[in-house]
Image (tube, coloured by chain):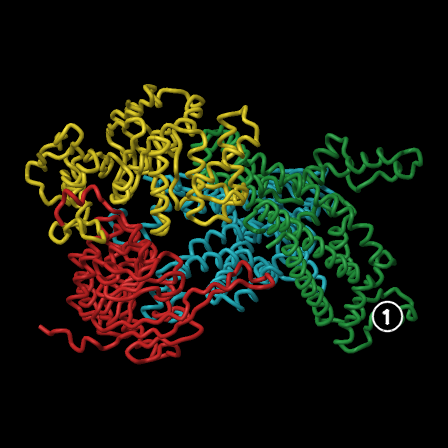
């Protein structure tokens, strides 16, 4: 078994990234309102780790994910993936980048095209990147589905998203991210739309994938408890600013910023249960 | 955005659109096969008069100069002389435009009000017999072929039953009689207007009622209706105070969107009932190759539609606080 | 004193595919001034119970059977007019935060005043406005925001205003249906604390419906767990949390992530969730496909209520 | 059998489900039967001229008839003032209505869908330009514009009329499709396709088009009605294609020749036909709308 090779190697470097939006509704006002989504944000993610980004809705955490995925442009700063600046990626280089970075979306009900079967959904990335022959493609698809916990994979080939339950859809979305064997995966609140017991199983699945495939994860969540469960290091983001970052235990045990402390205070306490139940 | 700012912005947009229509028409008239001079100058005119008109309209100039002349003439209200009437076009339009506005706006307002209030009621009785009957009736009304139903009305009400004038807007003998006061005259116009009004409204009521009905059904499944129910409000109050105002918004939008289509119907109605409006004038001018009149009528019809659109937009902003803030 | 007593309440929905049972013979009761939490996954019937109590089910919802005794009066037997006087004055609601519970074209204050004046027609408008202003103070919204439109409020403010509106007529019972879903964690906590505070100070009974068992435990004295339309476990919160009996409750608790790791989740969570659903006889336990403790007798016999303590019971053949 | 097959094919399954919902809808069923009736008329329009050349709708003249005659055994619906058979004119009218309605609607759907998708997907400048352009066309009364054009360019033939109608009736569809595209663009599966490396062309045609197609088809039925109405109105005003018979033209003849008070057998049928054929398409459209629009059948999802 390979131990962590070069644990300090940086896979993603976000440096002083700045992103603003124009408030569309006030476009015709004299002074158009500008909303700062990300205010000179910097962070570094090491190869092989799980990095958590914790923040409320509207804090800019999803915006950051979209920038890293190159779904949107940003004004200033730089994002380097494997030492390559992604800002000006085009054509072939962009395609190569797309192959390495994948997304696990938030809403399993909206992230699969209702008109494509599961097989076709998983086939699409392969045919875009011209990977494998017909037979090997089928094999890759089966492997991904099984890795995502959809067993037996062939049963799901002909199904359409609306024929699956929420948990199954999220697994299919994970399988799609897996077909390209990415180095880096961004999970954007992957369980916020799912019921508690199902979302717990999705977490376990992600941990399993992370361990077996040696993928680096950027895990985005509003839930500190989930971040604690899953992440090696976390950063807390509040209104476009990273207010705190460090190893998970350190941030939770010894929060430095007021916002983090408020977040921790807002968690359910169960003071009644603590005394009677052993930890 | 405040209401005033909204009006300003929309007016600006409308000016731009109108300018584009104005220019588009010019190039259409001057680039279409055939001689633009013969289009704008009455063939029966004396050569001297014709020459005067040609230089006045700049028809002997190159295209871009002609275009500037055209813009200038539009601004000064000079549209040339109607071939048929032998009078300045702007005079003819000035007489016709108020008649069109009277008939058109009355029918749109009446049918919108009727459509909204009936649609509201019908939606309340969804699935009941009333609903089915009214829905299908509105469907039929909405799809009736307008000129035909106009002919039918003339045949039935004016010819078979009688009591309604066959055509026109006024009875000349009544108006030439010095004894008849303004009230009698107004009644006379109303008498002439009833059938055209009925024709136009029947088509529109059906449309607006159907929109209101489905909009109402959608609104009734909104969460705030549940809130209103939970508050213990009576069904009538829910319908009139909460569902109704929200549901009528799409009707207002739709009135605006279909205005251009409605004016088609207006022109047809005017033609069949020989109502002396601008739409009939356009159709008449086109049939008789009276180009100056046709051009000007079209421009003024566009202005009517654009202004009506502005009014609808303002009304919408007034009804929906989310638009203005 | 018992405020609300629900007996054998069954509610079904008429769909194109036939009639589907959403709430299956639910029975529970609630003391005056106490709070009860209903927990379950989406679609388990918890919202349907809440709506059923006020007879506000959608058109295709049918109350098939049962009694809803509120202060001794069966709400299912009275006329619609009588029901309207109960709504809001006796039982009010705090709606899901994600819902557009406010009419978008009316001012918020106007809508609250309406609720007061419907039930107290002799109140003048000024008096009603005065009362709303006091309530706004209670829920920490500045007074000058009273006559704004809903779209000018933030999510948390809308929700606080809903709470204010729920209190207008001094009801005996408030049904709070997922009042914090779709709000930020910190705002969520504020709303929860507010509800808790109001519940305590005004001693209003609260039924708190949520998918989040942690949230429910924060607020409620008693907890009721629902699964597929059936109540599967009822008890005081300490009992349900510390000694969960039904396997479903256990799985809910074991998958609940907390900051300090009160619950050990490593071993118990099941991996069988992805089995395709097969139709099983309706009389046997609905959780059987996912249950790790089920034995062959569960496949044959219907589940029974087991009483652990006088206040704590579970619908499972196996728990003792 | 069909159901077993349907389980295999998603499209067929959706179609069957939609069909059963559609057929349960009274309005849709009436519309469908009316439409079948008109289709039958259009097919039958080829028969009369084969029986006797005097039944030809344009050139056939009954040598024994010198003025408009009421229905008789040789002319089931009567004749017009120069002795042409009204029934065969009516049947031919059905053919023309279908031809005009469906081709014009199809063309405006193609324009509208393409422009709407491009505007919605591209966004920014291209979007505002296209939509301003659409707004401009939308405020132009199509009938009057076509009238104006025909006075400038001389008599228009039926294909030019069809083209003009479709050129003026696409903006409504484009708006709807654009709105749908905008909301689809927000849906994560489009992002997912981009993350997978899909090109814009692929996203538009593989991911957006199938999702907007049902809506486009729905709007096609509504456009058929408006195309038929505009053509009929043009013909009624005397600007139709002089080489074909259409219902609007029949109405023009009865109106212009002053027979409307004397010949109800001539006045009524064309008007009824125009109204009913538009009604039938409209009814089908409404029923389809209910099938397609999940908001109108919300109760199903609520459990």
- x, y percent for residue A15: 36, 75
Q: Which chain is yellow?
A: C
Q: Which chain is red?
A: A
Q: Which chain is cyan?
A: D
At x 32%, y 80%, the residue is A84
- D155 up-or-down from D27: above or below: below
Q: Left or right of B139: which side holds D147?
A: right
- x, y percent for residue A43: 32, 71
- Check the image and name the residue furthest to the left: C296
Q: Which chain is green?
A: B
Q: Is residue D250 visible?
A: yes
- C33 up-or-down from C149: above or below: above
- x, y percent for residue A104: 28, 62
Counting the numbered discs, the total is 1
Q: Check disc 1: other Cα within 10 Å, few if <14, some if 14-19, many if 20+.
A: some
- D60 up-or-down from D79: above or below: below
Q: Left or right of B180: which side holds B159?
A: left
- C208 up-or-down from B129: above or below: below
In terms of image quadrants, where is residue B179? top right
Query: Dot 1 corresponds to which residue?
Result: B56
Q: Chain of mark 1?
A: B
Residue sitting nearer the eye, D229 or A211: A211
At x 19%, y 56%, the residue is A155
């Amino acid at each position: 078994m390979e131990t962590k090779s070069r644990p300090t190697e940086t896979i993603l470097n976000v440096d002083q990234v700045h992103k603003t939006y124009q408030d569309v509704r006030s476009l015709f006002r004299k002074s158009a309102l500008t909303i700062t989504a990300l205010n000179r944000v910097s962070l570094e993610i090491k190869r092989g780790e799980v990095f958590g980004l914790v923040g409320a809705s509207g804090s800019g955490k999803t915006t950051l994910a979209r920038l890293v995925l190159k779904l949107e442009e940003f004004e200033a700063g730089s994002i380097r993936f494997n030492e390559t600046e992604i800002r000006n990626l085009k054509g072939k280089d962009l395609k190569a980048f797309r192959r390495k970075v994948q997304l696990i979306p938030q809403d399993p009900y909206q992230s699969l095209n209702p008109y494509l079967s599961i097989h076709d959904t998983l086939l699409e990335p392969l045919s875009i990147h011209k990977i494998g022959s017909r037979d090997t493609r089928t094999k890759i698809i089966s492997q991904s589905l099984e890795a995502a916990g959809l067993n037996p994979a062939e049963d799901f080939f002909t199904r359409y998203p609306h024929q699956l339950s929420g948990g199954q859809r999220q697994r299919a979305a994970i399988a799609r991210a897996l077909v390209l064997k990415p180095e880096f995966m961004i999970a954007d609140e992957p369980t916020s739309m799912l019921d508690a017991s199902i979302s717990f199983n999705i977490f376990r699945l992600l941990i399993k994938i992370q361990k077996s495939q040696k993928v680096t994860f950027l895990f985005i969540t509003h839930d500190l408890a989930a971040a604690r469960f899953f992440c090696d290091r976390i950063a807390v983001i509040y209104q476009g600013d990273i207010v705190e970052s460090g190893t998970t235990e350190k941030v939770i045990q010894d929060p430095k910023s007021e916002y983090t402390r408020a977040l921790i205070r807002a968690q359910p306490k169960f003071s009644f249960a603590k005394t009677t139940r052993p930890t | 955005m405040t209401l005033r700012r909204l009006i300003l912005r929309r007016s600006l947009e409308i000016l731009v659109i109108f300018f584009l229509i104005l220019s588009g028409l010019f190039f259409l008239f001057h680039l279409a096969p055939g001689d633009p001079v013969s289009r704008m100058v009455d063939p029966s005119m004396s050569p001297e008069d014709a020459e005067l008109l040609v230089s006045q309209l700049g028809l002997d100039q190159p295209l871009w100069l002609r275009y500037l002349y055209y813009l200038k003439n539009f601004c000064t209200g000079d549209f040339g002389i109607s071939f048929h009437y032998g009078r300045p076009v702007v005079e003819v339009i000035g007489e016709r435009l108020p008649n069109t506005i009277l008939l058109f706006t009355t029918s749109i307002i009446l049918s919108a009000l009727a459509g909204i209030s009936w649609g509201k009621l019908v939606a309340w009785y969804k699935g009941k017999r009333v609903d089915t009957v009214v829905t299908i009736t509105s469907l039929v009304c909405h799809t009736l072929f307008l000129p035909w139903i106009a002919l039918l009305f003339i045949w039935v009400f004016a010819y078979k039953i009688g009591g309604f004038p066959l055509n026109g807007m006024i009875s000349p003998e009544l108006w030439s009689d010095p004894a008849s006061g303004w009230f009698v005259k107004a009644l006379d116009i109303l008498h002439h207007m009833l059938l055209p009004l009925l024709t136009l409204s029947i088509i529109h009521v059906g449309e607006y009622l159907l929109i209101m009905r489905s909009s109402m059904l959608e609104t009734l499944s909104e969460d705030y209706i549940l809130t209103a129910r939970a508050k213990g409000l009576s069904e009538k109050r829910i319908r009139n105070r909460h569902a109704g105002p929200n549901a009528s918004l799409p009707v207002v939008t739709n009135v605006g969107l279909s205005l251009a289509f409605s004016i088609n119907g207006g022109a047809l109605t005017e033609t069949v009932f020989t109502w002396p409006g601008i739409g009939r004038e356009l159709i008449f001018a086109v049939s008789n190759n009276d180009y100056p009149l046709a051009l000007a009528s079209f421009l003024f019809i566009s202005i009517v539609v654009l202004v009506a659109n502005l009014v609808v937009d303002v009304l919408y902003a007034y009804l929906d606080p989310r638009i203005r803030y | 004193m018992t405020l609300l007593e629900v007996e054998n309440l069954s509610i079904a929905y008429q769909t194109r595919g036939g009639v589907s049972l959403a709430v299956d013979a639910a029975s529970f009761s609630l003391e005056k001034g106490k709070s009860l939490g209903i927990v379950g996954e989406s679609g388990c019937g918890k919202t349907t119970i809440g709506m059923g109590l006020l007879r506000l089910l959608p058109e295709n919802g049918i109350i098939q059977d049962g009694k809803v005794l509120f202060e001794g009066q069966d709400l299912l037997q009275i006329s619609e007019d009588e029901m309207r006087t109960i709504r809001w004055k006796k039982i009010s609601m705090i709606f899901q935060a994600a819902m557009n519970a406010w009419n978008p074209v009316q001012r918020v204050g106007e809508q609250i005043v309406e609720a007061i004046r419907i039930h107290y027609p002799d109140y003048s408008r000024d008096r009603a406005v005065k009362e709303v202003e006091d309530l706004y103070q209670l829920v920490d919204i500045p007074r000058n925001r009273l006559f704004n439109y809903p779209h000018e409020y933030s999510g948390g403010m809308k929700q606080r205003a809903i709470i204010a509106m729920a209190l207008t007529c001094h009801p005996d019972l408030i049904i709070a249906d997922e009042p914090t879903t779709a709000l930020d964690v910190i705002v969520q906590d504020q709303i929860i604390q507010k509800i808790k505070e109001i519940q305590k100070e005004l001693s209003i009974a609260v039924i708190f419906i949520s998918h989040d068992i942690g949230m429910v435990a924060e607020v409620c004295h008693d907890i009721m767990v629902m699964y597929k339309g059936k109540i599967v476990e009822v008890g005081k919160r300490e009992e349900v949390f510390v000694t969960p009996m039904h396997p479903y409750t256990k799985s809910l608790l074991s998958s609940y992530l907390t900051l300090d790791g009160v619950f050990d989740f490593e071993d118990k969570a099941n991996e069988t969730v992805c089995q395709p659903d097969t139709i099983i006889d309706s009389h046997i336990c609905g959780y059987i496909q996912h249950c790790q403790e089920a034995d062959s007798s569960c496949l044959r016999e219907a589940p029974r209520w087991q009483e652990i303590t006088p206040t704590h019971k579970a619908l499972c053949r196996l728990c003792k | 059998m069909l159901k077993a097959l349907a389980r295999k094919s998603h499209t067929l399954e959706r179609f069957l489900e939609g069909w059963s919902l559609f057929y349960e809808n009274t309005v849709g069923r009436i519309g469908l039967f009316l439409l079948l009736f008109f289709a039958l008329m259009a097919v039958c329009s080829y028969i009369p001229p084969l029986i006797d050349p005097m039944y030809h709708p344009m050139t056939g003249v009954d040598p024994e008839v010198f003025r408009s005659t009421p229905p008789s055994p040789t002319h089931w619906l009567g004749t017009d003032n120069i002795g042409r058979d009204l029934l065969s004119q009516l049947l031919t009218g059905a053919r023309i209505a279908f031809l005009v309605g469906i081709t014009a609607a199809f063309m405006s759907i193609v324009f509208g869908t393409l422009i709407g998708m491009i505007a919605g997907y591209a966004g920014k400048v291209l979007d505002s330009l296209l939509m301003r352009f659409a707004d401009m066309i939308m405020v132009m009364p199509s009938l009057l514009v076509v009238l104006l054009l025909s006075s400038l360019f001389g008599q228009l033939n039926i294909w030019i009329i069809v083209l003009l109608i479709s050129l003026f009736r696409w903006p409504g569809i484009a708006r709807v499709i654009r709105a749908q595209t905008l909301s689809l663009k927000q849906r994560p599966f489009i992002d997912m396709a981009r993350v997978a490396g899909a090109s814009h062309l692929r996203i538009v045609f593989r991911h957006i088009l199938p999702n907007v197609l049902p809506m486009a088809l729905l709007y096609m039925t509504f456009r058929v009605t408006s195309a038929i109405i505009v053509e009929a109105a043009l013909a009624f005003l005397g600007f139709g294609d002089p080489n074909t018979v259409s219902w609007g033209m029949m109405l023009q003849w009865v109106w212009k020749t002053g027979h409307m008070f004397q010949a109800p057998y001539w006045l009524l049928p064309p008007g009824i036909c125009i109204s009913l054929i538009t009604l039938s398409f409209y009814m089908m459209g409404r029923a389809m709308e209910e099938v397609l629009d999940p908001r109108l059948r919300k109760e199903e999802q609520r459990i």
